[in-house]
Amino acid sequence: MKPRKAMTLAFFVVLLSIGYFSMHAAPTLSDENYSYHGDTRWQTNVTAAEETAAAEGKPIVVYFWTTWCTYCEDYNREVYADPAVQSELGDFVKVAVNLDDDGSESGRMQREYNINYPPQHVIITPDGEVLVRVNGYAGTEDFLSYLDAAEQRYASGGSI
Amino acid sequence: MNVGTVLLGLAFGAALSGVGILGRAYAAEDDAGVEYVPKLTAAAAVLLVSALLHLTYQFVTTDYSNAYVWENTASYLPLLYRITGVYAANEGSVLLWAAIVSIVAMIAGAVRGISDQHAKLVHGLTLGLVAYFTGMLLAQSPFASIRTAFPGAPPGFVPTSGQGLNALLVDPYMAIHPPVMFISYALLAMPFAIGTAHFVSLFRGNGGVFPTWHGSVTRWLRLSWLFLTAAVALGGLWSYTVLGWGGIWAWDPVETAILIPWLFLTATLHAVTAYEPTGRYRVLAPAMTATAFALVVYTTSVVRSGVFRSVHSFADGGIGAAFLVLMGLTAALGVVLPVTYWLLETDDGDGDGGDDRWLRRANLVHLAVLGFGLLTFVSLWGLSFPLLRNAITGLEVSVEARYYNLWSYPLVLGLLLLLGFYMDYDADGRTRALAGLGVFTAATIVGAFVFPSETWQLASTRPNDALVYELVGSASAASVLPPVAYAILGTVKRTGGRIRAAASRDAKLKETGITLIHVGAALLVLSLPFMYVLAGQASVMATGVGDGSMDTTRQAVPGSDYSVRVLGHSRTEFPQDPAVGTYALSTDQVVRRGSSLNGSVQTVHGTVTDIREGPRATVVQLDGSSVWVGLAGNGTATPATTGERIVARGRLMWNFVPSADAVVLARAETVGPTADPPENVVPTRVVAEGVSLAVYEGDRLRASGIAGQRRYPEQGGMQVRDVVIDRGLVTDTYVIAGVSDGTASITVKQVPFVTLMRVAIVALLLGMSLVALFDPRHGAVTDTAIRAAARDTSPEVAD
């Protein structure tokens, strides 16, 4: 085989390998009902989350995010991947709202809680009363204390 | 129909007639009417430029009867940013693009003429692009009347204030980045036309265009590369100063998109340089030339169609569909046509002339072309596969920065080693060069294991990662040093010899240019990973900022050598004390606009000439005119006296009462003296809040200034950062502050190697300018004489 033909063939082999491997190495962001952040799984259907929360008597963590938000990546990498955060989040119903989603539910949540940039968290009762707001990025320790505060407020039946 | 639409319609007619005449002339090989084509081209160019100037004029004068102007500007913006608004969204940028392509077509037609069959085809294709863009503009016009935005508004309705410009675009870099980018995109129209015409002509049995137009293609490509490089650089510097990331690059879909044509253009330049009419790159060079434009259209579709969401996907909507169709057309002509030719017509696409040696300069250049091809693919695929996967499986996958970083990194190192080897081989021959390659490759591999600190690792690996991610991710950034050194050493050494051997001043300048480009590229590669890997940051909180009770002594920033002194707090609202005429209508204006204002909320101003108190309301006459301000209540709340100049805001009712034309139904808090208008009457467009601070490293003052953010209340509360950057020779000190509720959160970042990156960019731009100007064969300066002489003797080999 002539050298340039061999090189060109090798080029296509490498190209196809990059294509194949990268497609399978990419972490899943969402499927039909859930989106994935770090090692946590968040519901994407707000109504369903509200129903679950009402049935189980749990507060809801609403996470407002976008694919292009660098601090959301930090959340995925630093905060949600942390086992302590994961276990604490087990006491909540988790729902993630993509701010780029044009759907009516996303719009309703953005208006209701006055959200205009990612990342933000609103922890609410099943009735939608705000327990705690987390604006912007919070490190693991801070995030855990926000979750704690929300749980205590919820247990004492109060909201801010 | 308005002036702008008429200009666009005429331009469309001119371009389309030109295409029609050329199409018929080419198909029938009959020159009837061809003499009109240069005139039609010039007409299209003049009309499109006029349309662009007309739109710019509407922006400068904030003519809100045009919906596009209303959507993209506001009168509080300074002149520069009112002009920037012209290309802030789809319609304006397509107009800019169309105007530049038409100028390119006009110049190319004038310089070369459109006498032969090939020239007709090339000119027809370029003019076809102009016609297509103009058609897009007729379908979705930048001159659409405001009634399209407010279909229910009464005839003649014109809003008094504009929506404003996207806050991220209010920056000097962004004022020049889009035009520079569109110039580069428009310049690619010629290589596209020439490449496509080459294959059309081959299929028709007319022989190829490329051998004759090779020099022309080279010049257009170089010029386009020059502008595209400048555009990428300006975009990077913009994100560095405006976004507050402390970085120049974030692998955002839009940023990846512009890199695709840049990488491909670089590959194409190498292929075109090595092109030989009968041998190497007989098919590939024209094919790549034709494809580059299709990639640009793909890129633009990505940014403009709204398919991709991104931090700066500035526009989406209907024009996206037209881009998708154009993408299909250009891909069919620029990609499918050459591939079909290659499959059907060439028995051996290799064209190697039977040379079976592996180690030849031609093969090394081929490897470079393939390497840049792979880099282009990495960017293109990263942009495309999430869409493909979502469409096929319904799963949404994330493409992270490490996808791009980890696949590109080894390719870039490979290309640098190849560059070093090529230069060495050219200067010193086979044995020496192979030994050098061995040494530097070994050093690269060793470098991958050298970790001066944990942060030098390229990426943190995760369990279940693909092998290649683990392998490349765990390598050290030190591995970039040997290839960079090799590439620079090889290039500089070879240049020394070649400059001495060069016959003319122009040849010497060209060699210098080539060296600058390659050294610049190597330095750029050196600066990029370290800018991110070695960046450090630390934060500190300052409380009591709002009420002035903050600590003004030096506070240490935990975890760093920095300390910060907060000196003060500032909160400014723009526009400050605006002239009343910029936000309120005079009584004359109200009367002139008449019933079109009926029912809308308006701000009016005038001198009080009469006050009448009734049982349920008080009415105040302005300027002795038929315009009155109405206030509910029985007189006790009258905020004005006769002779006073007042401003009032409220719903304007036309023919509301028999004795007045217009009554503005205001409330007491929306009426006040012009000299001190009520707060909720004067529009606040920007709220800039920040802290003035001084940052010390040890005892040395490193940076001082105001850091904070600018919020745009009328644009969904959008925010941009005001950062303080101290540009150091080795390291930039980059200060970001978030100020709200009396607290400032201050982050001090160290960003190394930014100066090196700036030097690298200057070297790239300067180098390409030298090559484009002084190349003895295809340079802009030297070539004119050669071309003129050659045309006289043999038009077929003009280049």
Image (spheres, rainbow, N blue to C red):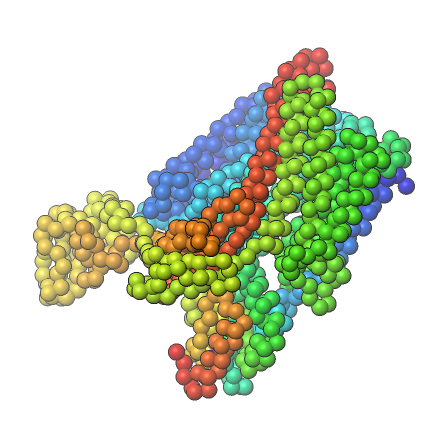
x then y, percent, for residue B125: 64, 32
x then y, percent, for residue B630: 17, 59
Residue at the location (67% across, 22% down)?
B507
In the image shown, does B287 or B657 lie closer to the viewer?
Answer: B287
Quarter of the image where one finds residue B714: bottom left
In the image shown, does A72 or A16 lie closer to the viewer?
Answer: A72
Would residue B5 appear left or right of B296 to someone viewing this image?
left
Residue B570, above or below B338? below
x then y, percent, for residue A128: 45, 78
Would residue B736 appear left or right of B255 to someone viewing this image?
left
Residue at the location (37% across, 58% down)?
B566
Residue at the location (46% across, 47% down)?
B726
In the image shown, does B391 or B150 lie closer to the viewer?
Answer: B391
Residue at the location (52% across, 53% down)?
B750
Judge whether residue A47 can be spotted in this image. Answer: no
Would residue B68 appear left or right of A100 to someone viewing this image?
left
Q: Pick the quarter of the image with the N terminus of chain A.
A: top right
Q: Pick the quarter of the image with the C terminus of chain A.
A: bottom left
x then y, percent, for residue B19: 60, 31
Residue B318, above or below A65? above
The mark tally for this picture is 0
Residue B429, above or below A145? above
Judge whether residue B776 can be spotted in this image. Answer: yes
